[in-house]
Image (cartoon, rainbow, N blue to C red):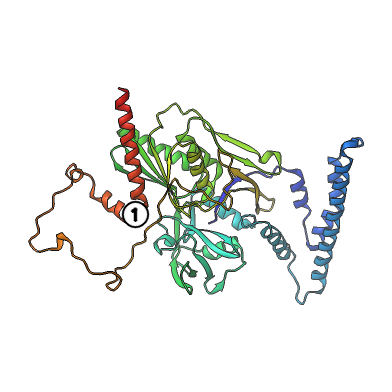
Amino acid sequence: MRSSSFRIFPLARARLAFCIRNVLSLTAAATAILLLSAPLLAEEQPPSSPPADSAKHQQKDEEALADTYRQLEIFSNVLSIVEGHYVEEVEPAQVIKGAIEGLLQSLDPHSSYLSPEDFKDLQEETSGQFSGIGIEVTVQDNNLTIIAPIANTPADKAHLKAGDIIVAIDGKPTREIGVYKAIEKLRGEKGTAVLLSILRKDWATPKEFRIIRADIALHSVETETLQPGLLYAKITSFKKNTSAELRKKLNLLAQKTPIEGVILDLRNNPGGLLEQAVDVVDIFLNQGVIVSTRGRQEEQNSLFSAHNNSKNTEYPLVILINEGSASASEIVAGAIQAHKRGILVGTKSFGKGSVQTVIPLLDGAGLRITTAKYYTPDDKSIQAVGITPDIIVPLQEEQESDANSAPSTTQESELPHHLPREEPAEMKKGVDTELNEKLQADNQLKAAYSVLSSLIFHTRKMGASKE
């Protein structure tokens, strides 16, 4: 798995298809580009001489083209030398693949070449099922880093955390191997084991985790009714049916009782499909910009706006985020915050503000390349910055009690023959004890619940005053 806000596009550009068809062997790869670029560029030339005011631009283009030819010639020479003089016979397809992978890895951590197997895995992920341990990873400072464990997966149950560095997989160091190579090693048949060496902040040395792989069936929306009219919805990732799942859950609740408020949990949600993030925001907004994208090419510049849903979705909304909330999650959080549609609670998000386009290639492989940056409705880029919540609530980890770390104290309830306690009013009214346990176990959720309860109270009060 990997963090992303991306689109899967058909191979539409003649230039890209033309080049791919001619990458046939080591020497032919460079030769084809050298020989065939000129006719291709000639087709793009205007039929007549360029205007005088564009002469300088034309000269710069010609100089850039000449420099490209020189670099391609060097590349062709290197390939030829490798083919003829390397100590062992090389496999042309494998060397070309390595060159392509190196080219893309030099751009940014999110651009990559997808082998036919990788491309198939990506399609399976976006459709909602794959086999592995259930983590999203990226590369930070040449370290393979966990963005987030997916809820209720082997990685989550092993207590892996956002920000953990995977030092080794099955004893092999991961430094500089790339995201997709690592994913390939993490994938495997259900029931097989993988050994991870994990380095966590404040750990002096890595610790080993033996994790059993499983089928990861991603139902990306999990919901729970906290109390009548109050819905808790957790989105684990943005798949192709995420917005439809959320709408269905909201509609089912609305049929039973009017919705008074929603907690939308995006913690440890590493992202997914851009369009699904937009559709989720559209559920809660009736107007205004949701997100915009900007790239070098005109077709990468997009503006996504909300539609009038003509339904009552203006109930109070609280969104939970943390350092594992990335990409598409940040699109949702940023739009809600910018429009002051809801309150953000938790800790600062991951800070991935780029969009990747996935382009299928002719041999079943794919190209995943960063083509744009996205901007929140208030025209802010969160790239390498993240989104700061309105109410910062760090997660309190459960710690084992240490008799030597704090003085011993005695409470009233521990005294012999103490008077029995009275049940709180809300307990007498039948509030679910499981809810209280859930809130006590998750201080961030407890804070979100408190904020939402206050917003609901305020909404009720405003409604009563209007009557």
Q: Residue at x 56, y 43 (%)?
A: 274
Specify whether 114 is left or right of 80.
left
Q: Quadrant of residue 157?
A: bottom left
Look at mark 1 in the image and give the residue it sits on.
442
Residue sitting at the far top:
467
Q: Residue drawn 29% across and 74% down?
A: 404
In the rendered view, tell whether residue 131 sits above or below residue 401.
Answer: above
Residue positioned 35% across, 41% down in the render: 452
Q: Is residue 146 above or below residue 49?
A: below
Residue 413 image point, x, y percent:
15, 59
Q: How many marks?
A: 1
* Residues packed near mark 1 inside 10 Å, few (<14), some (14 to 19) or many (20 plus): some
Disc 1 on helix, strand or loop? Answer: loop
Q: Is the C terminus in the top left, top right, bottom left or bottom right quadrant?
A: top left
Asked if residue 357 lies left or right of residue 152, the reply is: right
Spot occupied by residue 237 in the image (x, y as percentages of width and height): 48, 49
Judge whether residue 360 can be spotted in this image. Answer: yes
Which quadrant of the figure has residue 29? Answer: bottom right
Amino acid tagged 1: Asp
